Amino acid sequence: MDIVVFGASGKIGSAIVEEALKRKHEVTAAVRKPEAFSIQHDRLKVVAADLLDPATVTAALHGHEEVISAFGPAPGHENDLLQAADSLLTGMRAAGLQRLIVIGGAGSLKT
């Protein structure tokens, strides 16, 4: 499967990228700073994309089968989740994709 992962440079996103590669998937890591992304692999492509910008999201999505978002906003920027969701949906429609998996870290919060 050909997967694009947004938030791939974070703790959860990088774990998803590594696991997908172990399972023999073709993976694209969509990150803001490709030069800072440290994972390397023959089946890994790294592209620049800003999840808050629908145009770069759309460009990153073309040619993929599945989208995974592991985006986590910086503290104080929780409203970015809404803009990120809108960008993802806009990009998915433009790229003709229908499969989205959203991963979050809320399960680790103390109750």
Image (cartoon, rainbow, N blue to C red):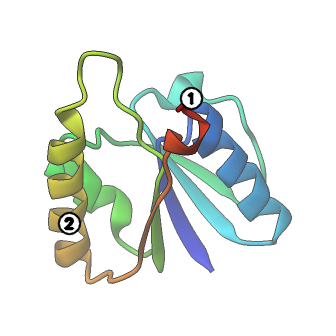
**Front label number (1 vs 2):** 1
Residue 104 on image: x %, y %: 49, 47
The quarter of the picture where residue 95 lies is: bottom left
Tally of numbered discs: 2
> In whole angstroms, how far apart are the C-alphas of marks 1 and 2?
31 Å
Q: Name which of mark 1 and mark 2 comes first in the sequence.
A: 2
Q: What residue sits 55% from the left and 56% below the top?
A: 28
Using the image as rendered, state which of residue 84 and residue 59 is in the foreground: 84
Using the image as rendered, state which of residue 35 and residue 97 is in the foreground: 97
Position of 11 relative to 30 (above/below):
above
Instruction: Report the disc number at residue 110.
Output: 1
Amino acid carrying label 2: it is: Leu
Classify 10 Å Cα crowding around label 1: few (below 14), some (14-19), many (20 and above).
few
Residue 19 on image: x %, y %: 77, 57
On the picture, is 22 further left or further right than 15? right
Position of 111 relative to 47 (above/below):
above
Q: What residue sits 62% from the left and 41% below the top?
A: 12
Residue 36 on image: x %, y %: 57, 22
Residue 69 on image: x %, y %: 44, 54
